[in-house]
Amino acid sequence: MTGNGTGDAEALREEIRRTRVELGETMELLVARADVKARLRESAGQAKERMRQQAAQTVARVRGQAAQKADVARSQAHEKGATVRSNPVPWATVAAGAVAAVVVLLIVRGRRR
């Protein structure tokens, strides 16, 4: 052996330091795996976030469908309104028939009393 051996001692100290760091990291991983409550909380948080995303997607889809249905209903109502305005006689006949039916029902009820 040549010299006083300080190089070997420094290398040994450095290896001990690295081993301690590695051991500390390994212990942290083992503690994290053993912490069931924390793992369950994390898993529940992830599931909660997935449900929020799915709910947001569903709400967006339903709103889009509702908007489409509303547009269809508006256009149909507009078409029906135009039909009634262009030819009001059949609708007036239906309305007169309904009024006559109500009057007949009232008369029949009045006779039964």
Image (tube, rainbow, N blue to C red):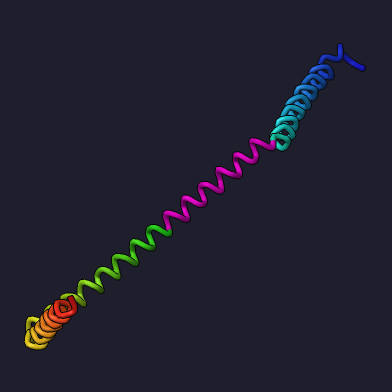
Q: Residue at x 60, y 41 (%)?
A: 42
Q: Which residues are magenta?
A: 36-57
Relative vertical location of residue 6 with respect to residue 82 in this rendering, above or below? above
Relative vertical location of residue 102 with respect to residue 18 in this rendering, above or below? below
| Frontmost residue, 36 versus 86 | 86
Q: Residue at x 76, y 24 (%)?
A: 20
Q: Percent x, y for residue 29?
A: 71, 34
Q: Residue at x 13, y 83 (%)?
A: 104
Q: Is residue 101 visible?
A: yes
| Frontmost residue, 38 versus 18 | 38
Residue extending furthest top? Answer: 4
Main SS, magenta region, reads: helix
Q: Residue at x 74, y 34 (%)?
A: 30
Which quadrant of the view contains residue 77?
Answer: bottom left
Q: Percent x, y for residue 101?
A: 15, 83
Relative vertical location of residue 74 with respect to residue 104 in this rendering, above or below? above
In magenta stretch: residue 96: no
**Residue 25 vs residue 52: left or right?**
right
